[in-house]
Image (cartoon, coloured by chain):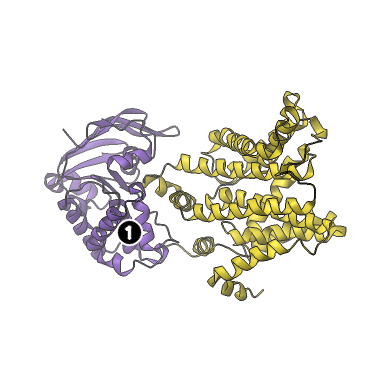
């Protein structure tokens, strides 16, 4: 596949960035509610992908239980709304904090694990969260049926009922997310993640607190997924433990890897491939898992760096193939 | 008081007792070398000093302050820089980016970073020529220069060098060792681990010989260079 036209766009970022934002704003206008919902889902998963990209892409750590934090965010919003009557928008900070706190508690003891060992433990923790939700822990999660009747959010007397409102709501948070991610990429913390990803021993010897830096990636990424969960609860108003399914985590992971780990545009492409396409070809949706498997195999053979990789990751892969000397 | 004082140090890798009661001193302004065969525990000693492996017994103190239990990143802040064995260069970062990484603990102090970088470029003009090149595309000797330069970026008072001559041609070894002497003359204390005993003893003030986790000989470098046992075991003479 010839992707050289992509690199031409990359040289003039302003052109496609402003074009893309304009496109995203105008996109739902000619569409019906169904397609507006598809667009909403896509944007939501881009956000989830970006939050996971922080962990997998920037810090180079495996996280195959990311959906657990998404679910925790959604449940926090729902429980605060249903039990205490707190308006949904006011639950967002709590959703972020709860997901981030769990991210901290869960990953703190396993940070020293590397590579595939970390992957296995994150899968297990994802399942623990899902099973806790299914078993109606503390009697507040509603068991296997989940929670329903979440009050729709209101802002300035406006009730968020129509799909288009929710689309703009997630788009707003997505723009903030992208802005924050770009700042993080170029921050001191971003550089520390890069060093840890490339060579943990050297990073440690250079005075980087590797434990703290890795923990921060998990905490920030989890909190962000929690925000996405709250946005989901706001739109759907019915949530269930299915949010924390392993398959959800896999989809998020694939969004990051398919597009290109560590790359923001890559996550866009990943979300289009993993969420939008299967939705548009709904009659074939049962085949999604098969399509996912085949795509991953083909990708790993033909383009392991992803469809729109970050320059750095591309170099890393080339280097690991070249003989060392 | 010594700049670095190690007393009866014990470390383990799993169940393997790697260091069995090491005692050594490094005075301010010295070059001290640790020589010995493969697996004697030389690198392990450096790793214990810089906090990369835990201390199980005994003590290490730097500038009068204990280093036991201090995490690696704090030890760098106190003024100990480690140029690890095997170089650990960031292959996808340029030479300049690699150097900046060594200055991580300096934070946003751009003046200090620039000053240290200029100093490194002066020591290794070759690195300045290649400053925009990726670390992975450098030759072995240049990578070694970069490893040492990167360790100097944190303005250390004590520089730990692990096998800087490994895999280098004799001419390059000489260049590197001359530079180590130059670094030392500029006021940085050096603890040098080497298998190339002859080259190390020539530039060092004092030396320790290690064998299977213990120090077996210690003394002035010149005296050890003349010592019959050392000549036989490490300098390949009959």
Q: Can residue A127 be seen in this view?
A: no
Q: Which residue is drawn at 69% across and 50% down?
A: A169
The answer to whether residue A301 is above or below residue A119 is: below
Q: For residue B211, which quarter of the picture? A: top left
Q: Which of A60 and B114 is in front in this view?
A: B114
Residue A15: percent from the left, percent from the top?
Answer: 58, 71
The answer to whether residue B117 is above or below residue B35 is: below
Residue A43: percent from the left, percent from the top?
Answer: 70, 55
Q: Which of A32 and B170 is in front in this view?
A: A32
Q: Residue at x 30, y 53 (%)?
A: B153
Q: Which residue is drawn at 60% across and 75% down?
A: A4
Q: Which of A140 and A289 is in front in this view?
A: A140
Residue for badge 1: B146
The answer to whether residue A189 is above or below residue A307 is: above
The number of callouts visible is 1
- Taking the image as shown, residue B124 lies to the left or right of residue A198, namely left
Q: Which residue is drawn at 35% across and 61% down?
A: B96
Q: Pointer 1 indicates a residue of which chain?
A: B
Chain B in the picture: what colour?
purple
Chain A in the picture: what colour?
yellow
Residue B48: percent from the left, percent from the top?
Answer: 34, 37
Circle 1 residues within 10 Å: few <14, some 14–19, many ≥20: many
Q: Can residue A155 be seen in this view?
A: yes
Q: Is mark 1 on a helix, strand or loop?
A: helix
Q: In which quarter of the image is the N terminus of chain B?
A: top left
- Taking the image as shown, residue B25 lies to the left or right of residue A43, namely left
Residue A266: percent from the left, percent from the top?
Answer: 62, 61
- Residue furthest right in the image: A283
Q: For residue A74, which quarter of the picture? A: top right
């Amino acid at each position: 596949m010839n992707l050289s036209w992509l690199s031409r766009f990359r040289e003039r970022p302003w052109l496609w960035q402003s074009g893309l934002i304009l496109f995203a704003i105008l996109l739902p206008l000619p569409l019906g509610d169904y397609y507006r919902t598809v667009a909403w889902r896509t944007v939501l998963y881009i956000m989830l992908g970006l939050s996971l990209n922080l962990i997998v892409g920037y810090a180079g750590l495996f996280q195959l239980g990311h959906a657990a934090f998404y679910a925790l965010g959604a449940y926090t919003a729902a429980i605060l709304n249903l039990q205490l009557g707190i308006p949904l928008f006011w639950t967002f900070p709590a959703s972020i904090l709860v997901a981030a706190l769990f991210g901290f508690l869960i990953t703190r003891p396993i940070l020293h694990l590397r590579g595939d060992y970390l992957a296995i433990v994150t899968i297990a923790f994802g399942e623990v969260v899902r099973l806790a939700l299914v078993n109606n822990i503390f009697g507040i999660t509603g068991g296997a049926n989940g929670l329903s009747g979440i009050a729709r959010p209101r802002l300035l007397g406006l009730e968020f009922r129509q799909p288009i409102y929710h689309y703009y709501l997630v788009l707003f948070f997505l723009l903030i997310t992208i802005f924050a991610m770009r700042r993080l990429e170029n921050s001191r913390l971003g550089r520390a993640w890069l060093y840890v990803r490339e060579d943990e021993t050297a990073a440690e010897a250079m005075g980087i607190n590797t434990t703290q830096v890795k923990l921060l990636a998990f905490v920030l990424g989890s909190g962000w997924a929690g925000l996405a969960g709250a946005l989901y609860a706001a739109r759907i108003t019915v949530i269930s433990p299915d949010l924390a399914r392993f398959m959800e985590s896999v989809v998020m992971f694939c969004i990051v890897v398919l597009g290109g780990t560590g790359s923001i545009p890559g996550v866009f492409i990943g979300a289009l491939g993993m969420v939008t396409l299967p939705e548009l070809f709904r009659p074939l949706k049962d085949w999604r898992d098969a399509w996912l498997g085949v795509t991953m195999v083909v990708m790993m053979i033909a383009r392991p760096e992803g469809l729109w990789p970050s320059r750095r990751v591309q170099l890393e892969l080339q280097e690991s193939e070249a003989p060392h000397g | 008081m010594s700049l670095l004082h190690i007393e009866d140090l014990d470390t383990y890798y799993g169940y393997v007792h790697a260091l069995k009661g090491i005692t050594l001193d490094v005075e301010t302004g010295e070059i001290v070398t640790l020589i010995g065969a493969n697996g004697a525990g030389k690198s392990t000693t450096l790793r214990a000093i810089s906090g990369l492996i835990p201390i199980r017994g005994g003590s290490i103190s730097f500038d009068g302050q204990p280093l036991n239990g201090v995490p690696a990143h704090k030890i760098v802040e106190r003024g100990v820089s480690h140029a690890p064995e095997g170089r650990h260069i960031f292959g996808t970062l340029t030479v300049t980016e690699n150097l900046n990484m060594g200055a991580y603990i300096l934070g946003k102090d751009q003046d200090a970073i620039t000053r240290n970088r200029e100093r490194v470029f002066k020591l290794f003009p070759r690195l300045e020529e290649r400053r925009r090149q990726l670390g992975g595309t450098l030759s072995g000797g240049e990578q070694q220069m970069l490893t040492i330069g990167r360790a100097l970026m944190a303005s250390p008072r004590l520089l730990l060098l692990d096998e800087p001559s490994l895999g280098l041609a004799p001419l390059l070894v000489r260049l590197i060792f001359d530079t180590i002497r130059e670094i030392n003359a500029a006021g940085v204390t050096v603890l040098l681990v080497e298998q190339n005993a002859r080259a190390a003893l020539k530039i060092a003030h004092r030396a320790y010989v290690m064998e299977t986790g213990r120090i077996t000989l210690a003394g002035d470098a010149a005296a050890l260079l003349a010592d019959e046992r050392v000549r036989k075991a490490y300098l390949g003479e009959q």
